[in-house]
Amino acid sequence: MDRRAAFFAIAAVVCAAVSPATETEIRWIPIAMAVGYAVLSVLSFLDAWSRHHDHNN
Amino acid sequence: MESVALWFVVLVALGFDFVNGFHDAANSIATVVSTRVLSPRLAVMWAAFFNFAAFLVFGTAVASTIAKDVVVQDVLSIGVIFAGLTGAIVWNLITFFLALPSSSSHALIGGMAGAAVAKGGFDVLISSGVGKIAVFIVLAPLLGLLLGFSLMVLMMWASHKYQKVERLNRFFRRGQLLSAAAYSLGHGGNDAQKTMGVILALLIAQGEVGPNAEVPLWVVLAAHSAIALGTLSGGWRFVKTMGSKLTRLQPAGGMAAETAAAITLFFVSARGIPVSTTHTITGAIVGTGSANRISAVRWEMARRVVWAWILTIPGAALVSAVTYGIVSAF
């Protein structure tokens, strides 16, 4: 797996994990961050995959 | 005698604030210096001015959290606060000489908690306040990283078809002046308030002000002056670490990193959450670096930053607990 995608995936898990410990009023922040990191992880994976694919062709 | 001790510890707290500015000066100016937007001398003056001006922008919510939400007020005494400050200062000096960009804020919180626990056991910690701080120890650098990465991608996307590279660079270099100012405001706002919180706790413990008192104006002005003076005399040792050892920044990257860190610091300061300004800008720099390519980030250096992050609270707490043991013996 692409290193950047893996890093973002771990960051998404960390943000999701700390969200229950966050004050209710601002719990949306770690949740939004987890979603953001998850999206970036998928995009990074696709970016790396397409580069690899282009390179092989 | 008590009042001499009180003023002595107030001076030590302001000394910590000065060292904080000195220690963190490079965070404020590393990107503008490494991208050659300002000379080091002008950069520190720019950062120090906005460190001081921060008192006009931010309230005292962070100070209140430090004074009232970390340890129960009954345990606070001159000895505990002195030991807490000593632990934080000693830890900052150790990491300064090792050129590790550790957090002065975590050192302060670890120091206060360590000294208080040495006096009254773990029950003196206020779980809601400590929990809020602990959550943002993790979230603040990740938020800086996410914003830094997103801003950098946005800027690259918006400017990728623009042919006049020189003009574009000039725009980003000028933009960096604003982003550095915003970051220095955020730095002054969050970090100076931690010292205000310590002094407020001390004044409450000694009965100089009531338990629900706001931070007196002289404390606000003294704390901002101390951090600004510290920044003015700031150490250069970290400039290399933050500005070039983590990743090599261009003006656009510097602007994105500082803006991302400033947004994070403005938000947490408004919510009364003390965070590490060092780790926030570190996350933002790593974020902008990894927007180019992941190999642009020097992960070995980032790993050293993470180790400093993990060790700071227990390290400062241990030094403070030992200091409290010595102080209470007299």
Image (cartoon, coloured by chain):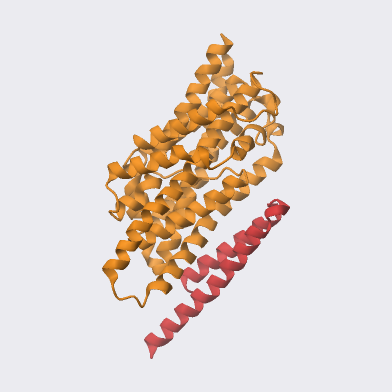
**Of residues B297 and B2, which is closer to you in this image?**
B2
Q: Residue at x 51, y 61 (%)?
A: B147
From the top left corner, tell me how far across and down residue B159 is, in percent: 38, 72
Judge from the rendering whether residue B205 lies leftward or rightward of residue B111; answer left or right.
right
Residue depicted at 69% across the width and 52% down the height: A21
For residue B243, side relative to residue B315 (left or right): left
Q: Residue, x 58% and y 15% (percent of image)?
A: B329
Examine the rendered structure and indicate whether residue B258 appears above or below residue A47: above
For chain B, the rendered hue is: orange
Q: Residue at x 40, y 46 (%)?
A: B28
Q: Is residue B248 visible?
A: no
In the image, B91 versus B279, the foreground residue is B279
Q: Colour of chain A?
A: red
Residue furthest to the bottom in view is: A57
**How far from the left and from the top, in percent, is residue B323?**
53, 24
In the image, A42 versus A3, the foreground residue is A42
**Which one is in front, B159 or B113?**
B159
**Eyeballing the image, is B46 above or below B85?**
below
Which image quarter is the N terminus of chain B in? top right
> Residue lying furthest front in this view?
B56
Above or below for B85 versus B265: above
Image x and y of residue B197, in percent:
58, 32
